[in-house]
Image: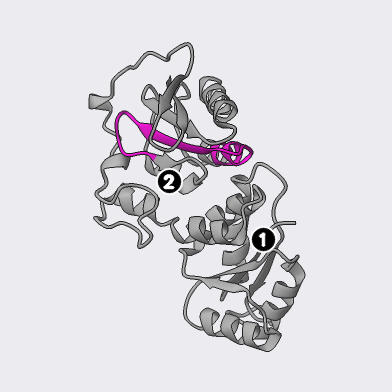
Amino acid sequence: MSVGIVVVSHSRALAEAAVELANIMVHADAPSIAIAAGLDDGGFGTDATQIMSAIEEVDGGDGVVIFVDMGSAVMSAQTAIELLDSDARILSAPFVEGITAGMVAAATGADLAQVVKLAEGSLNAKAQAVGDDFASESGEGCCGNGGCCAADNSTATSVPVPSSATSVHGSESAACEADVEIINEIGLHARPAGKLAQLVSEYDAVVEISCDGRESVEADSMMDLMALGATFGQTLHVRASGAQKEEALAAVLEFVRSGMGE
């Protein structure tokens, strides 16, 4: 099973388009997802009874998250939860980015807390890209000053890829790390970032990636990977720790060297 996802919107077309876009980024079995959007007569609005049915449809026991567009969508979702006596979570995540991050995370088997964390931190990539100077409340994700996503090709350096990973001993446990150059023309954009996040989730390891010396991000977050702004010819520094660190590092290096599936 996986965390269930409910999408609540005033517009059926908007909800369906957001889910369709998010599905492009899911490279495994899609999580359980239900849409509660629009009124029965085809008009705009939200309906608590629709949302109740959607929650019951996707609740497989691992938790349910609800994405809402605005205004009365929140009130309708709250009413549905109260009537069902459900522990479903209404998220304040941005609608499109949150649904995408949540679906990718749920598809990889992330638990409720991780789905919530990744969805609610999904605005970071856009904030960094446009130069907003703030960090998420949790302090997770990309750096708060825009540094790690300002991909400046003029300062990019070509770092040779070592033939084997280097073992680094920290204060807690050993980690493995290596550098790898991006060879696909578009770089680490949405589709490869989603694939990479899903790949990393398959290993019992924590994988962190930085780009040409910029602050590292956790590689299980598609949105944080996109925030790196890594492009063709730039170098990714990959660091892995945990029980399957060597396997995870090798898998990431192979993925990047092979063109990230493109």
Q: Position of residue 211 (x, y in %)?
A: 35, 32
| Badge 2 amino acid | Asp
> Quick one: quadrant of the N terminus?
bottom right
Label 2 secondary element = helix
Q: Is residue 122 left or right of residue 44?
A: left
- Residue plotted at (46% across, 48% down): 223
Q: Could you give the CA–CA distance between mark 2 and mark 1, rounded to whole angstroms? A: 21 Å
Residue 100 in sight in this render: yes
In this rendered view, identify the residue nearer to me: 125 or 64.
64
- Tag shown at residue 3: 1
Residue 211 forms part of the magenta stretch: yes
**Residue 21 part of the magenta segment:** no
Q: Secondary structure at mark 1?
A: loop
Whether residue 144 sits left or right of residue 83 in the image: it is left
Residue identified by numbered label 2: 224
Mark 2 closeness class: few <14, some 14–19, many ≥20 residues within 10 Å: many
Which residue shows up at 23% across the image and 26% down it?
A: 155
Name which residue type carries label 1. Answer: Val
Q: Indicate which disc, 2 or 1, sits on the residue closer to the N terminus.
A: 1
- Residue found 26% across the figure and 32% down from its top: 152
| Residue interval drawn in magenta | 195-216
70 or 215, which is in the foreground?
215
